[in-house]
Amino acid sequence: MRGYVELFRLGKTYDTHNGPLVIVEDFDLNLAQGEYVSLLGHSGCGKSTVLTMIAGLNSITTGGVVIDGREIDGPGPDRGVVFQSPCLMPWMTALDNVMLGVNQVYRNATKRDRIDLASYYLNLVGLGSILHKRAKDLSQGMQQRVGIARAFALKPKMLLLDEPFGMLDSLTRLELQEILLEILVRDKVTTVMVTHDVDEALFMSDRVVMMTNGPRARVGAIFSLPFDRPRQRADVLEHPEYYEYRRKMIEFLEGQDHAKIKNTRERDESKTSEPADLSLSSP
């Protein structure tokens, strides 16, 4: 079944002094337009590698990525990216940081239209009153809001989120999750989010893709969630299937932990069981 976004046999291999190291292998996934999918797995399993390949920021070793019928071959304005740290220009204002991308993508628009577009998305994330405040004077939560506004202002076909709330306090994280979902539902932007937080994945996603441990990480399981949109946190938490899905996801992660321990033990045992070389070298 074809999707609006297609990841087919996506793979990434790095050359090391010990030979090729396969980080991600045969990663297959299709997304419908407007769908929100989270990649969930342990640290180091390749989640961010998959995300940066979709973004065009990391070269693809095998397979490919197709978005709206076009195979990507590098970064582009059709994909907005929000990282854990928004990487703003600290000496520039919130408005000017958003305008950096807007000016590049909408060169033929009038200056007034470009300013209005950037201001509109800064207002949506709750920063309408501090448009002209420098980024270095903003709190971490406000800086991340600027990063989100910057991504949405480009009107991308796809939004890519790499643990966008990971550095925020719990109250700011919950507030930004709801703001982000509100904009995504209105603009119908297809989204992939990397997270290691089960509850965040459950609240935000239409589907959660569980990744196996690396190296050679791939799709291990996919959970399609039954929670309605627009989504209210209280309704999700009270849904009769919420804790069953939560249990299954945690069991999957625990299974990956056990597999890692087993593989490490077997590898250590194989090393200690190798016969010692007792041969004498010639004088």
Image (spheres, rainbow, N blue to C red):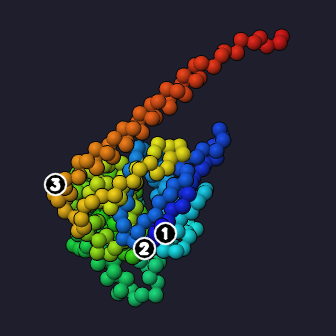
Where in the figure is residue 57, as x and y percent of width and height? 52, 61
Question: Label 3's element?
Answer: helix
Q: Nearer the viewer, residue 246 or 102?
A: 246
Describe the element under mark 1 as helix, strand or loop: loop
* Residue 18 seen in render: yes
Q: In the image, which is nearer the foreground, mark 2 or mark 3?
A: 3
Q: Which mark is residue 269?
A: none
Task: Using a 10 Å C-alpha cutoff, classify the residue at mark 2 as few (fewer than 14 neighbours), some (14 to 19) or many (20 or more).
Answer: many
Disc 2 residue type? Lys
Location of mark 1 (residue)? 2
**Three-letter residue code for mark 3:** Glu
Residue plotted at (31% across, 70% down):
184
Residue marked by disc 3: 238
Amino acid found under the numbered disc labelled 1: Arg
Residue 45 position within the rendered picture, expressed as x and y whole percent measured from the top left:
46, 45
Q: CA distance from mark 1 to mark 2?
A: 17 Å
Nearest the viewer among 25 and 186 is 25
Q: Residue at x 23, y 52 (%)?
A: 242
- Mark 3 neighbour density, 10 Å: few (under 14) some (14–19) many (20 or more): few
**In the displayed structure image, the side of residue 229 where residue 217 appears, left or right:** right
Mark toward the start of the polypeptide (1 vs 3): 1
Q: Pointers 1 and 3 in contact (CB under 8 A)? A: no
Q: CA distance from mark 2 to mark 3?
A: 32 Å
Whether residue 115 is situated above or below residue 129 in the rendered picture = below
Return the residue at label 2: 157
